[in-house]
Amino acid sequence: WCILGDFNVSLSANEKSTGPSNIDTGMRNFQDCVEAIEVSDVNSTSLQFTWNQKPKGEQGTLKKIDSIMANLDFYSSFVGSSAVFQPYRISKHSPAVLRIPMESTSIPRPFKFSNLLVHNNRFKDIVVNSWNVSVNGFWMFKVVKRLKMLKKQIRKLLYDHENLRENVKKPRHELDQVQTALDLDPSNFELQEEEVVYLQAFKDAIFWKKILMQKA
């Protein structure tokens, strides 16, 4: 579900163009309410301020007191939804529009975690980096958001591994070339370093191909 409208108070101190940056009682109560019902602002790329205190005055203040918020179930059900706050023109408030993409006809591929990934040297770094990303919102929203980012990285890692079935030929050919060149010029330090790199790449390809064949 989602809620939208004029809440008559900003959610954070930086959601206004002028004035003190302290958090007053109304803002604190609003923050507590938002956290309690577990909703967050829907992504928006339009106006950042939604209310003009004095449309005809020179000393007016712009604030964001209109919001479109949703819970995790809404985000999962309507992926790609966005909020649009249009120019207020002659009104004090910016019209708020919630855009929901049409239902996709394609069925997303279900996510399956393969235990073989934990043997990859990149796996731990991917998990740590994904979990250290700064995410705003209540705790459950932060956890789900980080898990989604982690899932995307793990999908890519698994895709790279699955491609190793066909990619063994490439590192083998490159290793053959550098070793042939090294045979003609055994004192060439650059070729020696290249051999180390290509040899490790070939070993990795063979290793993962064996694991993937066992998995299959």
Image (cartoon, helix red, strand yellow):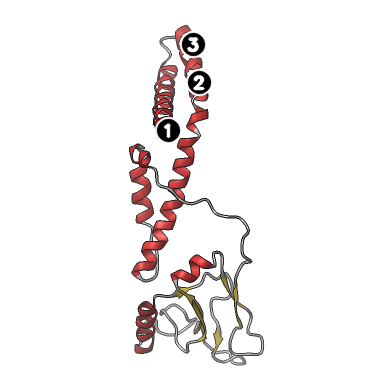
Q: Is residue 8 above or below residue 106?
A: below
Q: Residue furthest right?
A: 90
At 35% from the left and 49% from the top, the residue drawn is 127
Q: On the image, numbered disc 2 is attached to which residue? A: 174
Q: Is residue 134 above or below residue 89?
A: above
Q: Residues within 10 Å of mark 3 (few under 14, many from 20)?
A: few
Residue 20 image point, x, y percent: 40, 84
User: Which amino acid, mark 3?
Assistant: Thr
* Label whose residue precedes the other's in the sequence (3 or 2): 2
Residue 143 image point, x, y percent: 36, 62
* Label whose residue precedes the other's in the sequence (2 or 1): 2
Instruction: Nearest to the eye among marks 3 and 1: give it.
Output: 1
In this view of the protein, which residue sits in the foreground, 177 or 89? 177
Q: Quadrant of residue 203?
A: top left
Residue 180: mark in rendering: 3
Residue 12 image point, x, y percent: 41, 79
Quarter of the image with the C terminus is: top left
Do the numbered discs 3 and 1 sit on residues whose CB atoms are within 8 Å? no
User: Which amino acid, mark 2?
Assistant: Glu
Q: Quadrant of residue 30?
A: bottom left
